[in-house]
Image: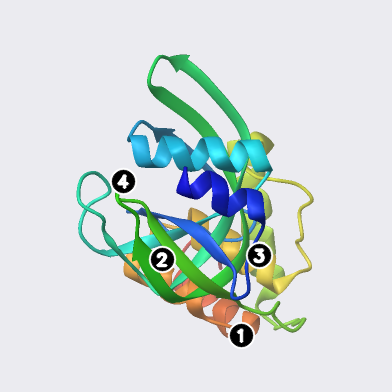
């Protein structure tokens, strides 16, 4: 009921949202499939659907996805449920979409084990057109054409360094701590430069 009341009242000063710690990094614009079965997250999902609200996704710094509340990283990404289905009783399948990034300023845990976080949204990045952008955008375009557009949300921003950088961070075989650092970066040009170097080192581009 606490989450229902929180979301029904709207975001209070400082904006408080339920936090979903995961063993994965969510980026803005990324589509994330989830299987929800723990009561605390069922309550969260139902509240978000009822009030058309969002929740926060953070990479786990300490702990596990299931069981005792995990300790989340301090920078995460807001998410909104775009599709849902319950093919099996007790298991909710949803597809969430990454929205904007936030910094976790404080957190508390409800009696049910759900983490509530007071967050500050990170501002949008300044537009950038680094010289590495065309090669990186071309690589992303080829991946989307090969994998299929259903995995990636439109519109595609091949001329947007932030969008291209986040798609590369999403699809490349990177360790989660590296993905987390790329999420935390606030310089789109720097992110593109790092990922372009990785593509060159892995001989994925010429």
Residue denoted by label 1:
187
Q: Is residue 197 above or below residue 58?
A: below
- Spatial separation of the CA atoms under disc 3 and disc 4: 38 Å
The image's mark for residue 52 is none
Q: Earlier in the sequence, mark 1 or mark 4?
A: 4
Left of 82 or right of it: where is 154? Answer: right
Q: Residue at x 59, y 83 (%)?
A: 186
The nearer-to-camera label among 3 and 2 is: 3
Residue at left offset 62%, top offset 78%? 122
Asked if the residue at tag 4 contacts the one at tag 3, i.e. Cβ–Cβ closer than 8 Å, the answer is: no
Q: Quadrant of residue 35?
A: top left
Is label 3 in a helix, a strand or a loop? Answer: helix
User: Which mark lies nearer to you, 1 or 4?
Assistant: 4
Which residue is tagged 4?
112
**Mark 1: few, some, or many residues within 10 Å (few <14, many ≥20)?**
some
Whole-percent x, y for residue 174 in the image:
38, 62
Q: Are marks 1 and 4 in contact (CB under 8 Å)?
A: no
Callout 1: SS: loop
Image position of 100 with respect to 8: above or below: below
User: Which mark, residue 164?
Assistant: 3
Pointer 2: what residue? 202
Q: Nearer the viewer, residue 101 or 128?
A: 101
Neighbour tally class for label 3: few under 14, some 14-19, many 20 plus, Cα within 10 Å = many
Return the disc, 4 or 2, that comes first in the chain's sequence.
Answer: 4
Q: Note whether residue 31 is visible.
A: no
Residue at image location 53% in from the left, 60% down from the top: 17
- Rounded to the nearest angstrom, the CA distance separating label 4 from label 2 is 45 Å
Say which of 118 and 171 sits in front: 118
**What is the CA distance from the residue labelled 3 to the residue labelled 1?**
13 Å
Q: Secondary structure at mark 4?
A: loop
Image location of residue 33, percent across then percent down: 49, 38
């Amino acid at each position: 009921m606490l989450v229902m009341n929180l979301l029904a009242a709207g975001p209070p000063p400082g904006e408080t949202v339920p936090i979903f710690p995961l063993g994965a990094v969510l980026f803005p614009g990324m589509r994330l499939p989830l299987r929800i079965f723990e009561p605390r997250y069922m309550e969260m999902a139902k509240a978000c659907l009822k009030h058309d609200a969002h929740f926060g996704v953070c990479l786990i710094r300490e702990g596990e996805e299931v069981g005792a509340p995990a300790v989340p990283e301090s920078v995460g990404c807001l998410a909104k449920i775009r599709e849902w289905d319950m093919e099996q009783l007790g298991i909710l399948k949803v597809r969430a979409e990454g929205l904007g990034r936030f910094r976790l300023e404080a957190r508390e845990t409800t009696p049910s084990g759900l983490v509530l976080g007071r967050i500050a949204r990170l501002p949008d990045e300044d537009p950038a057109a680094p010289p590495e952008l065309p090669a990186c955008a071309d690589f992303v375009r080829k991946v989307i054409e090969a994998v299929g557009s259903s995995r990636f949300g439109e519109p595609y921003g091949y001329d947007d360094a932030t969008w291209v950088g986040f798609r590369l961070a999403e699809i490349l075989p990177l360790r989660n701590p590296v993905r987390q650092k790329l999420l935390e970066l606030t310089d789109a040009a720097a992110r593109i430069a790092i990922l372009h170097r990785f593509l060159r080192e892995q001989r994925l581009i010429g």
